[in-house]
Image (tube, rainbow, N blue to C red):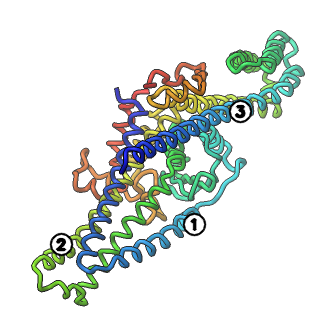
Amino acid sequence: MTPSTIIAIVVALVVLWLIFAFNGLVRKKNRVQEAWSDIEVQLKRRYDLIPNLVETVKGYATHERTVLEDVTNARVAAMGAVDPKAKLQANDQLSNTLKSLFAVAENYPNLKANENFAKLQDELTDTEDKIQAARRFYNANVRDFNTSIQVFPTNLIAGTFHFTKQELFDVDNPAEREPVKVQF
Amino acid sequence: MKTLYTEASSNVRKTWALMTGVFVLIIALGWIFSQVYDSPGILVFAVALSIVLNVTSYWYSDKIVLATTGAKQIQKSDNPELWRIVENLSIASGLPMPKLFIVPTGAPNAFATGRDKEHASVAVTAGLLQIMDKDELEGVLAHELSHVGNKDMLVSTVVVVLVGTISLLADFFLRMSFWGGGRRNDREGNGNLMFFLGIVGAILAPIAATLIQLAISRKRESLADASGALLTRYPEGLASALEKIEQNPSPTAGASSATAHLYFTNPFKADAGNEKKTPFFVKLFMTHPPIEERIKKLRAMSL
């Protein structure tokens, strides 16, 4: 083998590696985006359920105007939020207002007996769980992507082509928090 | 620090090491046989036969297994709580919602099957639903979904194909020796040595291959435990489910040794026994790691 063949082989290997590593990063980044849209699907489902809930509660708990307004406002704020972080924060806020709404509902036996209300409460609790699940999946993908752009030698490509670290969205409940510390 | 992540990746590494071991065995065996007989055709034929047989059973794995266990498919309205647990775990692991089945038997157990994540089926027994609370059920189902996510059906099919190839090769060799195929080299001392090696290999290789197959099965179980715990972020759920199952005396009806590796715990209870520590030799022949070992590992996980 002549030195020029060896050089040609080495160059070819480096180019191949570049292609694979770059495509791998693109794939992982798209996975993060897809995971984010999974969260949005669940958020949307919750936005759609809330007006029904507010209407149902209105009929029974006429004195709880402020609690209902809080929920409505939080929903509007969440739907209006643009960047992901603000959106999730607004949604955490929405979760809290819903929690207080359900707590208040405990005082109205007729409301609790209402079939429609029971169904909505059930659906909303389920949606809340699904939002948490989707966030976990999102975080898992972000962790994967972030690790890839930080380890050597892929970090060289990531730097050149401006792949930047994606943000982890910690789950509010400390018991469910992602162990982000274990990145290496 | 031992985290869930290191646990998962060390399991993956060990699985690959074991599979490489099987490959090396095949190559070694193939080399010895071709030395003795000068005919690489044996190897090709054995591999082809083994692949056709096993890929067929892999492709229809869900139908075969579900039919033999008598599992009934359910819809959301049949058991909304179970449905939701699976649905949420699927979202958290990024898998499509699998088909859900209930096996009408009292013994608590569960299994996952299907050729890929789009054709996955998860089945739980009626007994499992009866005795487990929500956290425990979640732990068990996360374990099963991890099998789907880790492509364990594919892994075990590949392993079965490899092990099958070894057994077929060994069988061919032994038959041909009886019919006098090795005579050609009798004059040379070297030929005799190779022939002797061939016989020894033909007897030992299938045993070694089966042991490796079982070791891989145990590895995949530990891996599913680890990734399941990663999914629920609550290893205690699965640990306490395992504890409950260990205390339950009934073996799973409808299980056969052919489907044993699919289950969530060994359906035959052969491993339960009275001893706290399972002897090494017994462990070699188990499809699942001993329950007490799995519980210990789960409880030691730091999140």
Tag 2, which secondary structure? Answer: helix
Q: Chain of mark 1?
A: B
Local crowd size for mark 3, using a 10 Å CA cut-off: few (<14), some (14–19), many (≥20): some
Residue to which mark 2 is pinned:
B197
Residues behind callouts 1 and 2 on a single chain = yes
Local crowd size for mark 2, using a 10 Å CA cut-off: few (<14), some (14–19), many (≥20): some
**Visible in this render: residue B40?**
yes
Q: Which residue is drawn at the image coordinates 44% and 27% (left, top)?
A: B303
Q: Amino acid at mark 2?
A: Leu
Tag 1, which secondary structure? Answer: loop
Residue to which mark 3 is pinned:
A37
Q: Chain of mark 2?
A: B
Q: Position of residue A154 (x, y in %)?
A: 49, 31
The answer to which of A12 and B9 lies nearer the viewer is: A12
Q: Residue furthest top?
A: A66
Q: Which residue is drawn at the image coordinates 28% and 79% (left, top)?
A: B38
